[in-house]
Amino acid sequence: MTLFTKMVGLSTIVFLTAACVAPEDADDPTIYAAAGANGLAATYFDNINLTVPRVERVDAVVNFDWGRGAPVGVAANTFSARWVGFVEPRYSETYRFYVRSDDGARLWVDGRALVDEWNDHGPRTFSGTVFLEAGRRYPIRLEYYENGGGAMVRLEWSSANQTRQVIPESQLFTNDGAVEPGGTVRLDVDDAFVDSAAPNANFDTTALEIDGDPSTKYALIKPRDIGSIAPGTRVAKATLVVRGFDGGNSYGVRELGGAWSEDSVTFNNAPGRSSQLASVSGSTGVKSIDVTTIVQGWVDGAPAHGLALYPNGSNGVDLYSSEHGTASYRPHFVVELSDSPDPCSDGGCSEGITHVGTTERWDSNGQNLEIARPSGSRTGDLLILVLHRTDDDLPLHVDGWTRVAECYKRDNGYDCSTENDCTDWANDDFCRRFGDYGRGGHDLAQSVFFRKVRSGEPSSYRFDLNIDSSGHPGWAILTALRGANTTDPVRDWSHTGCDGNADSLFPSVYARQGDMVLLSQSFDDAIAQSKFGAPTGTTRFGYVSNSDEAGFLFGGVVSSTGETGSMKTHGDGGPSCKDALVSLSIKPE
């Protein structure tokens, strides 16, 4: 169910703020609209297992005490609820999230499990910590159930600068705030100026001073929410708008080369600057500075560290800053977005899907499996994650990721089971039994997931593959693709658990010319990578081996439309039927 559109279509010009507010200045024709509804999307279930949905709505906050009752639409004593959406912190620091509940609750923030108390209990508070960056929206999911007696649940946070409180409606959203192509967007800014005469002082004031004498003063300005523009969008034109109130010599525009914070930047710790990109008259009044090329780079994934306004002479210029009380006086970026997100969208000049990079990780018991995002991946890329496990459980659901394929083997010589074969769920994430065969599906397994790289994407991901505190080895291969479809990337997939061959025979999939085929192999023995060479038309993207297990990932672009046919590795291979194989065809954007 679509709860809200991403933008409120009030005007061709849409200004983004954290919530709908009235213009502060009567002379400012701005129309403000929320980038996504405030609050979290809530689903209420008429049992304790999150499986019988009855009510869907948006809750402004999570702060409920139903006593011995229940929300409207579900029965008291045996109900459950799930809240999903995004949370936006105010400060860049470690946050503690608190869940107080009666009965069970579990909480994930940015894909990390912070609370996992899925059991009956009276009112109790649980918490966990995670580092967040100010102004970024992070996915959040809270699940809760009530199993008799009192019923309550509350979601709070705190940090070094954030007093503990129920997370307010203003910081909760039903979507990630991405703005679709078309129209014009205003991006508010962070800003400050620095002074060589006070090299360790921070000047986050209502004015920005730019001067070359007697000391060097220059301003730093960066957009607060460049990630609100959908990756791949064409920027027709972008301008930095500033207003001067004390004129002087011209000043130059330079791009900044590193991160900084408006409340702590100083002359000594400010990042480096590029050579001058443009010169601006030092007269008073409004100036619109063309920064189209720079902003397009930020939208395409380059770090948006912002700009330096640097003096060209000794007669200084003063500009109003983002701290000014009148909205129309504050610096801001105006970005005109093209209706065509990609000038090569007809395929005439597209480079197609390319492999950006791959990382691998093995963990001795699968409890702390942390894998880095591939170097060079950027906003708009597609991430394909393959989780592998031997002799133990492997989750079918991972928060923040979408599963697209799987293969769970009960033993050597058997074919794959899938989610549809599960007959005994431990919870929403793990299947204890496939079919009627003991712990069938736990001899060797792999699950394939995808995720789109967004602005503010974490540099690594951590997974706990265990239901309890101990387990057998687990391993992961994470690959990044550019130019791939990021909303529904898989055209076709297939699996096999016993190919009957010393080499690995990946099953055929349907693909179109320009698709990329990915071939994922789990192997139930440690083995050298030379034993399984890449099938014809592919290259090896990733390989990991340790202890008594191994994983491979191969990939290549398909040259013709149709069934690929089975694809065979080259080399000495290994014992037949000790592998689990998955083939996928990935669509281009």
Image (cartoon, grey):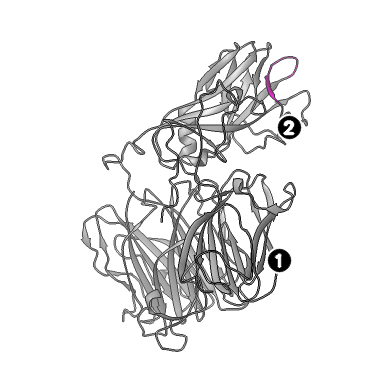
Q: Main secondary structure of the magenta part?
A: loop
Magenta stretch encompasses residue 214? yes
Nearest the eye: 467 or 531: 467
- Specify whether 462 is left or right of 182: right
Magenta stretch encompasses residue 310? no
Q: Please say if 163 is above or below 256.
A: below
Q: Quadrant of the N terminus?
A: bottom left
Could you tell me the amino acid type at mark 1? Answer: Thr
Numbered badge on residue 518 = none
Q: Please say if 360 is above or below 323.
A: below
Q: Earlier in the sequence, mark 2 or mark 1?
A: 1
Could you tell me the amino acid type at mark 2? Answer: Asn
Q: CA distance from mark 2 to mark 1?
A: 44 Å
The answer to whether residue 563 of the structure is visible from this angle is yes
Numbered badge on residue 268 = 2
Q: Residue 455: where, in percent of width, then height?
A: 52, 45
- Element class at badge 1: strand
Q: Quadrant of residue 122?
A: bottom right
Q: Residue drawn at (51%, 21%), measured in percent from left and top?
A: 289
The answer to whether residue 524 of the structure is visible from this angle is no
Q: Residue 90: where, in percent of width, then height?
A: 65, 44
Foreground: disc 2 or disc 1: 1
Q: Residue 239: where, in percent of width, then height?
A: 49, 25
Range of the magenta residues? Answer: 206-215
Residue located beneath label 1 in the image = 125
